[in-house]
Each structure stands twice: as structure tokens, then as C-alpha cells.
């Protein structure tokens, strides 16, 4: 059975790159009818917080991910101590009593010689008696893994292909810190082995960790899983995606009003090529059916916020149901203070306007004229008022709507009549009406506003502007 995992650290928000890793791991497991495990890697007790863990879980669920098993590494310390002791007994690990000052001097010496630093291994030669004496003296120590000298650790990466790394490149590394907490490269092996992980899908920045982990697998007699290292995600300037490119966390996009289905879909297309050319909109079920690691590109993917906005707009306009749209947009409209207690009214508004915005945050501004009567006139709109026969246009409009039904069709007819009677341009008529109804030069169509807004509100807004410019 295929078993994958996603193992985030609760030290910050869920980054888009990590979210893509989670999605790929999830899709691969579900495609093969296997298991997907979520494991919180919180061994860094100083930086890990329950608040970040809660947000990670919320964001993963929001994206539509579900898992078969859940673990926290902080609850498994006894297991790690047991296997660390086993490595010592097998001769694959040893206590290291070097102080931070001694290690710093070693590092400085390496820098002077212009060579990469690797631990000298001097505690490796301590005999059993020396170790016991140092322990009895109360001297603190770490536990290091004994790396064989001059060997190549070779593995076939499912994305990157053949990789060989010389053990002399990294030397003996710490698996248990002096405070008793285990390190990443150690616990990840123990957990992946005990949880039966068959495929480790993660970012390519983990490639240097892989030979260390393979050595631990072998030392403990565990089966080595298959590795698939994903290329990084770049910003549009071709540098690694970071905060200077703008929003880079799932939480950011939730707060901006993106749909989870759209973000899920878009992240899948970053570095993965679906078999059907030209198609970009996929449901989660479709992606589970067709996802395969062999279709992941070896080169970095470029994140485009504009492309994501476009895709989110497609989902809003064409993919989700009207009820889903209402449920998704409601929190944003409530936060803006709009009265949306009349669900039928809100439904009519969204039926007519869902093609006019690409995010829910943008919709708050676009839909303001349907929910707010008391608004300011923008500076651009005031400038336009000075150049058009606004007073005459609005006065005639008020007269015409007294005894006529107001809707999209009738307002178009009246606009043509006003244009002809006053000998003005169509643009002047529409701009005057838009400014009166919205206070802006751009936004939802005037015909749509007149089709939905109650007539008395339209009269009120026109009369208010007439008073201001009289």
C-alpha cells in the first residue's frame, strides 16, 4: 500500500510551497488508494506553538485535505530515546561532549582554510570508560550519528533521477541535542519507518538531508522509502518565492477571499503537467484520478498571482454553485457591515454580479452600491461632474422614472431618450447616473443596479446628488 505523509512544523503560517507539497502527497496517496498521514513536527519546543498548529490544521482542512492518521512528534520523545540508545548499542552513534566553544573554534579553523566545516569526530574515539567518567562529572553531551568515511550514499529520486552524495561532505551529525530533544534528521526516519511511509514527497531543499536519513534507515535495518524532491516555486522575478513577492501563505489568500478549490487547483499546476493539454480547471476528484509523480517537471515553477486571480474568477463565475458563492462571500460582506439578512435579495445581487469580481475581498467594494446608501463621491467622479450636464441629465431622469417601471431594459431606453432630448453624449448620461448611484466612475453596470435596487433608493440617491450640485 502507498503511504505518504505531510509533516509541517508549527512555527509559522502554511507557506504556498508547503501547501503544494501537502497537496501532491495527498493526491498521490489517494490516487493509489493508499493512506495520507499528517504529522506535526514540533520537536523545536521554543519555536513551535499551539496557535500555529491550530492554523495549520484549519488551513489544510480549508484546502480540502483530509488525513487517515495524525501524530505529534512532541508526544513521541520516548520512542526517539529508545532508538537513539539502540543506535549507540549497535555502534552507529556515540555521546559527544564537545562544548559550543570547541565546536566554534573548529568551525573557525575550517573557515580559515577555506573548506566546508564538518565535525572533527574527536569524541568518536572515546572508550566506554571515558564516556562514563564524563557523564558522571555532569558534563553535558549530545548524541551524534557515526557516519562512515569516504562512502557515497546513492538513491534514485523519482523526480530528480540519480543522486550520489559523499559522506565526507557532512560528517558525524547530531541526532539528540544536549537538552535531550531529538533533531529533524533523526526523528523523521524513526517516524517514517514506524508509520510505514513508502514515498517521501518534499521540497528539493531536503536533498542534502536525504543521505543522512538513508544512513540511519540502514543502521536500524529499516526499509528505505522512495524519495521525490519537488523543485522550488519561484516568484515572477525568478527568485525563490518569499514575502517580498507579496502574500505567500495560504492564510493570506483565505483572508483576501480566494476559494479553496481555486487555490488547490492552481497549486497543482505549479510544476505538474496534467496529461490533457489545454485544460486547466480540475475538480479534486479529477486530480486524484489523473495525478502521477512522473508528470512533475524537474525545473522550478513560477507563481503568478494574476493567473491565480484569473482562475479564482473562473471558479466564481462558472464552477461553484450560487449557494456555495453565497456561503463563501457572506463572512466578507458581514465584516464590511453590510445588511445581508435578506438572502433572496443577496441571491439576486450575486446572480447579476458574479462576473464582476475575482475575489471576495474585491466583491466587498464592487457590491457596496447594493448595500450602502450613504457614500462619498470619489475625486475622479467630482472632476467628471464639472464637465458634464449632470444636473439636467439627472433632473430629466427623475421625471421619466416617476410613472415608469425601472429595470435594466427601461433604463437603457430612458438613457437613449435623455441623450436625444438634451443633445448629450451617451457617456455623459451613463457617467451621471453611475456617479449618482455609486459615487464612482467604474463598477457594476448601471442597468444591473436599476434592475435590482428598489426604486425609492434610486430616487433618493439621485435627489441627494442634485442637491449637492445645485
Image: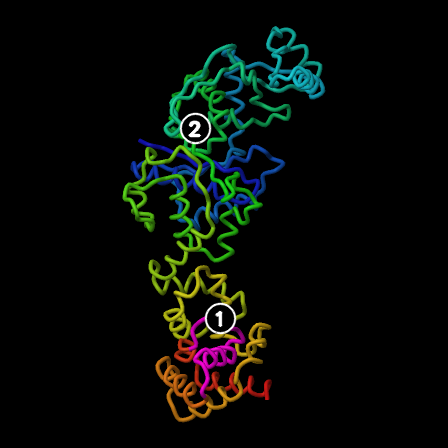
Distance from Cα at disc 1 to Cα at disc 2 = 56 Å
Magenta stretch in the rendered image: 423-446
**Residue at which label 2 appears:** 192
Q: How many numbered markers are drawn?
A: 2
Disc 1 crowd rating (10 Å Cα; few below 14, some 14-19, many 20+) is few
Identify the residue under disc 1.
442
Residue 35 % position (x, y): 35, 36
Which element is circle 1 on?
loop
**Where residue 256 appears, x then y in whole percent?**
50, 56
**Residue 296 image offset from top left, x and y in percent:** 36, 36
Q: Secondary structure at mark 2?
A: helix
Identify whether 398 is placed above or below 67: below
At 34% across and 34% down in the image, what residue appears? Answer: 293
Q: Find residue 241 and name its label.
A: none
Q: Judge by depth and name the residue closer to the eye, 1 or 168.
A: 168
Callout 1–callout 2 Cβ contact below 8 Å: no
Judge by depth and name the residue closer to the eye, 110 or 446: 446
Question: Quarter of the image holding residue 118?
Answer: top right
Q: How is the image coloured?
A: rainbow
> Residue at (41%, 45%) from the top-left corner?
267
The residue at the point 49 percent across, 54 percent down is 254
Q: Quadrant of the C terminus?
A: bottom right
Is residue 443 one of those drawn in magenta?
A: yes
Q: Residue at x 34, y 40 (%)?
A: 273
**Is 332 rendered above or below residue 462?**
above
Mark closer to the chain start, 1 or 2:
2
Amino acid at each position: 500500500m502507498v503511504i505518504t505523509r505531510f509533516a509541517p512544523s508549527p512555527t509559522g503560517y502554511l507557506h504556498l510551497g508547503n501547501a503544494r507539497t501537502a497537496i501532491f502527497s495527498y493526491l498521490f496517496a489517494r490516487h493509489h488508494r493508499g493512506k495520507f498521514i499528517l504529522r506535526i513536527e514540533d520537536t523545536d519546543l521554543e519555536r513551535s506553538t499551539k496557535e500555529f498548529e491550530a492554523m495549520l490544521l484549519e488551513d489544510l482542512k480549508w484546502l480540502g485535505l483530509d488525513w487517515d492518521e495524525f501524530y505529534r512528534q512532541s508526544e513521541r520523545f520516548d520512542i526517539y530515546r529508545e532508538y537513539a540508545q539502540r543506535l549507540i548499542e549497535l555502534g552507529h552513534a556515540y555521546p559527544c561532549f564537545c562544548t559550543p566553544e570547541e565546536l566554534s573554534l573548529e568551525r573557525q579553523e575550517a573557515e580559515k582554510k577555506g573548506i566546508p566545516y564538518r565535525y572533527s569526530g574527536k569524541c568518536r574515539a572515546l572508550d566506554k570508560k571515558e564516556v562514563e567518567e564524563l557523564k558522571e562529572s555532569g558534563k553535558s553531551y549530545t548524541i551524534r550519528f557515526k557516519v562512515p568515511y569516504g562512502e557515497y550514499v546513492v538513491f534514485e529520486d523519482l523526480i530528480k533521477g540519480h543522486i550520489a552524495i559523499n559522506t565526507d561532505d557532512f560528517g558525524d551529525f547530531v541526532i539528540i541535542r544536549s537538552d535531550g530533544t531529538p533533531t529533524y534528521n533523526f526523528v523523521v526516519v524513526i517516524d517514517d519507518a514506524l508509520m510505514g511511509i513508502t514515498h517521501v514527497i518534499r521540497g528539493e531543499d531536503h536533498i542534502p538531508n536525504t543521505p543522512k536519513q538513508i544512513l540511519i534507515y540502514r543502521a536500524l535495518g529499516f526499509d528505505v522509502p522512495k524519495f521525490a524532491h519537488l523543485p522550488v516555486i519561484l516568484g515572477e522575478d525568478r527568485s525563490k518565492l518569499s514575502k517580498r513577492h507579496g502574500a505567500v501563505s495560504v492564510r493570506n489568500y483565505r483572508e483576501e477571499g480566494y476559494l479553496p478549490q481555486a487555490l488547490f487547483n492552481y497549486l497543482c499546476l505549479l510544476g505538474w503537467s496534467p496529461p490533457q493539454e489545454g485544460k486547466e480547471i480540475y475538480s479534486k476528484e479529477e486530480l486524484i484520478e489523473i495525478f502521477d509523480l512522473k508528470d512533475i517537471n524537474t525545473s522550478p515553477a513560477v507563481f503568478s498571482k494574476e493567473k491565480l486571480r484569473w482562475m479564482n474568477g473562473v471558479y466564481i463565475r462558472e464552477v461553484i454553485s450560487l449557494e456555495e458563492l453565497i456561503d463563501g462571500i457572506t463572512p466578507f460582506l458581514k465584516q464590511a457591515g453590510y445588511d445581508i439578512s435578506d438572502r433572496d435579495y443577496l441571491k439576486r445581487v450575486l446572480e447579476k454580479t458574479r462576473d464582476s469580481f475575482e475575489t471576495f475581498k474585491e466583491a466587498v467594494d464592487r457590491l457596496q452600491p447594493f448595500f450602502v446608501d450613504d457614500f462619498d463621491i470619489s475625486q475622479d467622479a467630482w472632476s467628471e461632474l464639472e464637465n458634464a450636464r449632470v444636473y439636467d441629465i439627472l433632473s430629466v431622469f427623475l421625471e421619466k422614472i416617476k410613472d415608469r417601471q425601472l429595470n435594466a431594459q427601461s433604463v437603457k431606453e430612458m438613457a437613449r431618450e435623455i441623450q436625444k432630448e438634451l443633445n448629450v453624449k451617451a457617456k455623459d448620461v451613463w457617467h451621471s447616473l453611475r456617479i449618482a448611484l455609486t459615487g464612482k466612475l467604474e463598477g457594476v453596470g448601471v442597468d444591473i443596479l436599476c434592475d435590482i435596487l428598489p426604486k425609492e433608493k434610486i430616487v433618493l440617491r439621485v435627489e441627494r446628488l442634485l442637491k449637492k450640485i445645485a
